[in-house]
Amino acid sequence: MTQMDTVAARDVLVGSARAAGELGLSRAEFARAVQLGIVRAGPSARSGAARFARAELDRVRSAECPPGTAGAEALRERVETVAGAAAAARVLGVGPSRFTRLARCGHLTPVGYRINRYRAVVWLYLAAELREFAGREPAVLRGSAPQGDRELMAANADLRPRKWRGRHVGLLLRRTADPWARAAVLAAVLPQGELRAAVPERAERLVLAALAPPPPYGHPQVPAAAAVASPLLKADQPEEIHWYRTSLDFALTGARGQSNATGERGPT
């Protein structure tokens, strides 16, 4: 194969299923790797389906599966998730009730969710992060709850949805530098009333809606389950809403400046 052929092969784009197979991952593992930014998508197909350059797959293999390691095991460990308090508690070496308290009080951040057959939210956690937390914060896993946690539990607080939204938004923002697309990520988290107040011009709201990110991997398609999961996508506390509105205002200032410079509304 000539050098030109090698370069051309690295530019070839493949679909998600083939990319997952070439990295030795299941479809779910690969989707999590893309979500976390470990694998970067290339230009989408006309249908909107994600595609991945062979050069990117080569980069991931080189970074995550260096010579002498057990193939894709290191990459699998990075994307391994556990579902629910019982499974996550076993990774930490604590009881489910203690784990639930740690998660509800914001010590641990979910990476995803699913809705079970009882229409209850089951949070997913990265096993590697749980192990890292156990090694970093052994004192938190033993003894009495600190005063801050006791106050949160007395108020029946649950920071898991907010912590997940923050993580999800951060991951989406890191995928794009386009100011309108970044504004759309922030706009998607705001309830409709707040969005209308933040973006009174309908034409701009249409641009943001067109660029809105799709629901995250694992979001249910069945209407009954989707009705349970959809509220997780929206900020629901005053201080959280204020933070996203402020961030959106800042992002829109940059996006409008781009449009004024180019004479076009929306991404260029």
Image (cartoon, grey):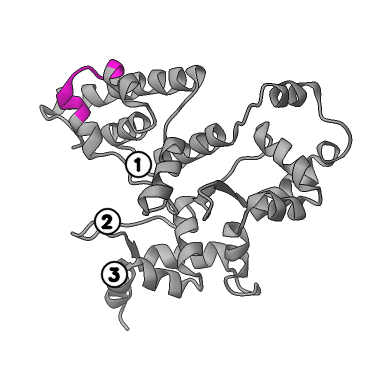
Dot 3 amino acid type: Val
- Quarter of the image where one finds residue 262: top left
**Considering only order in the chain, which callout, 2 or 3, is on the residue closer to the N terminus?**
3
Secondary structure mostly seen in the magenta stretch: helix
- Quarter of the image where one finds residue 197: top left
Discs 3/1, front: 1
Residue that badge 1 annotates: 176
Q: Position of residue 154 (x, y in %)?
A: 72, 22
| Relative vertical location of residue 64 with respect to residue 236 in this rendering, above or below | below
- Any mark on residue 109, and which? none
Residue at 45% from the left image edge and 67% from the top image edge:
27
- Quarter of the image where one finds residue 181: top left
Dot 1 amino acid type: Thr
Distance between the Cα atoms at labels 1 and 2?
A: 12 Å
Distance between the Cα atoms at labels 3 and 2?
A: 11 Å
| Relative vertical location of residue 156 with respect to residue 118 in this rendering, above or below | above
Quick one: 157 or 147, which is closer to the camera? 157
Residue at 79% from the left image edge and 39% from the top image edge:
137
- Any mark on residue 43, and which? 2
In the drawing, does residue 131 fall left or right of residue 211? right
Discs 3/2, front: 2
Dot 2 amino acid type: Pro
> Label 1's element?
loop
Residue 245 magenta: no
The residues colored magenta run: 197-205
Residue that badge 3 annotates: 12
The quadrant of the rendering that contains the C terminus is top left
> Label 3's element?
loop
